[in-house]
Amino acid sequence: AKEDREKNPYLAYIGMDDYLAGKTAARRAISSGRIKGRAVVAIQQAGHEGLEARYRGIKEVLSSHGIITDKLDTTSDPDMIRKIMSQYLEKHKDTDSVFYLGPLTVHSISSILRNKRKDLYICGFDISPQILEFIKTGVIDFSIDQQPYMQGYLSVSLLGLKCRNNLKLADINTGVGIIDKTNVHIVESLTTKGIR
């Protein structure tokens, strides 16, 4: 945005549009048919601009479908995340879905997902070996990858073009890469090569 460039001049933004990614995640989750009444969005760093944008996108789409959408500040402490999420789910038994905004949350609540609430629909953002395993085993429906390899590769490539040819650089949205059961094995093989 223009105001961002005025505050912090940069040549180009190369990364995921978090707000649009949030909307995409919510639409994909709605299409599952498993979200009916209440969703919780676990945010591990309340106030973080990117995470808040993801939340806004999710909430906008879910609210338009009449789904109650709660934002839950879980902190970034794994023990607190487990405690806060357990208390929330105990109080709101009608919750049928959890959106996580980063790996820390889903890693921390994995015991809750496996033991207490296997009925929850789970989806979110970013990938890790554990998240890929959760997708393969059906604990998580999908996770959105902002494709950091592409972010790094394109940054260097565009800087080269700028230095060699004095070209004006353009913003590039590197998301949304949806990882689900249809492509998790491909992505998993690329993680061992450092590409995903």
Image (cartoon, rainbow, N blue to C red):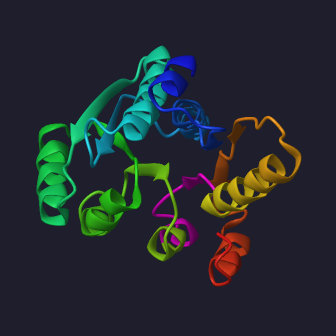
Residue 136, position as x, y percentages in the image: 57, 71
Pick the residue in front: 12 or 39.
12
Report if residue 146 lies within the magenta region: yes
Q: Using the image as rendered, state which of residue 83 and residue 56 is in the foreground.
A: 56
Q: Quadrant of the C terminus?
A: bottom right
Please provide percent x and percent y for residue 183.
72, 65
Q: Nearer the viewer, residue 169 or 172?
A: 169
Residue bounds of the magenta highlight: 134-147
Give residue 43's quadrant in the image.
Answer: top left
**Rendered view: 108 above or below 73:** below
Looking at the image, residue 78 lies above or below residue 14: below
Question: Is any atom of residue 179 visible in this view?
Answer: no
User: Can you say whether 87 is above or below 12 in the image?
Assistant: below
Q: Position of residue 172 (x, y in %)?
A: 72, 40
Q: Residue at x 86, y 53 (%)?
A: 164
Residue 80: x, y in percent?
A: 12, 58
